[in-house]
Image (tube, helix red, strand yellow):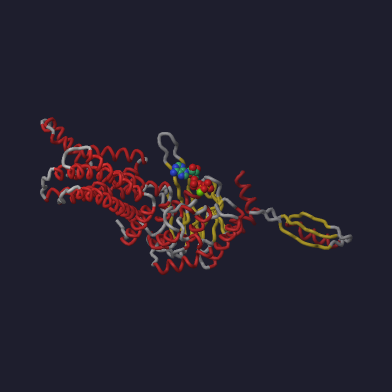
Amino acid sequence: MKLNLNNTFTIAKYTAKEILKSKILISTLIIGLALFVLTFVAYSFSYGDPARIAIDFGLGMLSLSSVGIATFIGVSLLFDEIEQRTIYQIISRPVGRNTFLLGKTFGLISVLVINILILSFVSVALYLFLDGEMNNLIVWSIIFTVVEAIMVLVIVSFFSLLTSKVLSVLLTISLYIVGHAIGGVKLLTFVKDRPFLEYIIDGYQFLLPGFYKLNIKDFVLYKKSLPTEYLFSSLSYGILYSLGVVCLSIFIFNKKDLN
Amino acid sequence: MLNLQNVTKKFTGDLFTQDFVAVNDLSFNLKTESVTGFLGANGAGKTTTLKMIMDFIRPSSGDIVFDSILGTNQMEIFRNIGFLPERPYFYPNLTGREFCHYLGKVSGMNTGEIKRNIDKWAPIFKIEFALDRTIKNYSKGMLQRVGFLVTLLHDPKLIILDEPLSGLDPIGRKELKSVIKDINNEGKTVFFSSHIVSDVEEVCSDVIFIKNGSLFYEGSVDKIIRENSKNDFTITAFDSNDLKHIFEVNLNEKDKKISSLMNEGFSIYSIEEEKPTLEEIVYEVKSK
Ligand SMILES: Nc1ncnc2c1ncn2[C@@H]1O[C@H](COP(=O)(O)OP(=O)(O)OP(=O)(O)O)[C@@H](O)[C@H]1O
Ligand SMILES: [Mg+2]
């Protein structure tokens, strides 16, 4: 696989520039503001510990909006380039398709990270304002949100190489929901009593994304700590899974007619 | 410079559409340092051919071979090609200048070279005034002009243009045609598709003409015109009363006619060969 790191960097840089100059950052700020207001509203209508509600709500919304942004920009990553033929401008240069795809992906990931950091900042600031205590797991939870969003981004752009935008988004959302639910399903006694169901679920986990591994909100909330190995294994899972999907995308992208 | 060998492109249909052969067993050789026009009606397969040359799509069969002056591997070869797509579209939120830097960088240029070449070409394409605006506010002609700028920015040896003159006003077309001649004089090979035959006749030394995806004619413009001319001449002469007469003769009768006219006391004013324009030839072929 031929790769030109300089070009990958240039493509990433201008991809990020192009997106940051569009309206997407503004919409993130609006989401941030909405997050802030909603958290405040949730807080005023409930009795429990205000800081806990703030972080519960904040992290939940953070994860959802990050996944939303990732889906939104990820589905256009390659699809729009091909559809609008801007890709011709780049790959008619001495830029291999591998370099192009990686550069685009890194560019979008950097935009995604900036967005998530802004939103995290809002959530955590509000939490601290409501006398919450800072906690390692909160930082981990934000890191996992980033990883989860990256997984969603590469998955949706992978699908967009094979099918339409709408279908790609629907497939990704389904995987996201199932990928979160599957962790709980495995713990059900109904499943535990039926080994073949367990096999099916293991098979699923082998191929399809186990998003539940990146969901540590309950632990953050109830202040339970988590073993470091678990955190690192989830982190590497997310990163390796994303790399795997990117490799698959490169494979398909190389074969594709760019019409 | 570039050699197509029995290239075929078949678009495989799905459940609802049939397979379609857009380019059929096409072979031609693009002459180094020529300006070659790529002619064909709408849907003849010009864009499909150019996409295969640029490796955007892969031929179903056949080979595309580049001259070794361009390089020995695809990256070197593409470093030496400037390609302008049909109806080019650019990143709308970048400025023209940012876009030039983007493409210059990925073409392996450094910032100094990029700046120097922007300064060289922007005035020629009359686009300097707009380079710091975002591209989404550009008019169609401005897009085309930035397109030319980035196509020539990295000083390519082979320049491939898909319908470069569409979207330009008459002055813009004239300017571009003279740029094409100029860069050709600097030793660059230009290959451009068009349906506007008179443009091709004006700037091209050679022409490759395809019809329904197959080669119809390949060769020099002069030759196709010579081959299709009927060897008719028009003789204009004045008689002793200064009245103008026009005679049409073919090649064989020309000299005899002239001497007999002179014997009769005519004064020969002009002898012109009736050349068909490339356009007439092409239309004749198209309607066949
Ligand atoms: N992806 C595709 N799938 C099916 N058919 C296609 C595809 N792309 C092009 N074609 C068909 O191939 C033929 C040639 O198209 P092409 O764009 O190469 O023509 P062209 O000579 O460039 O025409 P124009 O002068 O209008 O630009 C057309 O009939 C077109 O419909
Ligand atoms: Mg075309």
Q: How many marks?
A: 0
Q: Is A194 displayed left or right of A209 in the figure?
A: left
Where residue B89 sits: x, y (%)? 46, 52
Q: Is A96 displayed left or right of A189 in the figure?
A: right
Q: Is A2 displayed left or right of B199 in the figure?
A: left
Nearer the observer, A64 or A10: A64
Where residue A98 sits: x, y (%)? 32, 54
Using the rendered image of the protein, determine whether residue A95 is visible from the camera's viewpoint: yes
Using the rendered image of the protein, determine whether residue B77 is visible from the camera's viewpoint: no
Q: Is B242 displayed left or right of B22 in the figure?
A: right
Where residue A41 sits: x, y (%)? 25, 40
Q: Is residue B100 above or below residue A212?
A: below
Where residue B7 sits: x, y (%)? 45, 50
Q: Residue at x 75, y 60 (%)?
A: B271
Q: Quadrant of the C terminus of chain B?
A: top right
Q: Residue at x 37, y 40 (%)?
A: A164
Nearer the observer, A189 or B7: A189
Q: Residue at x 19, y 38 (%)?
A: A203
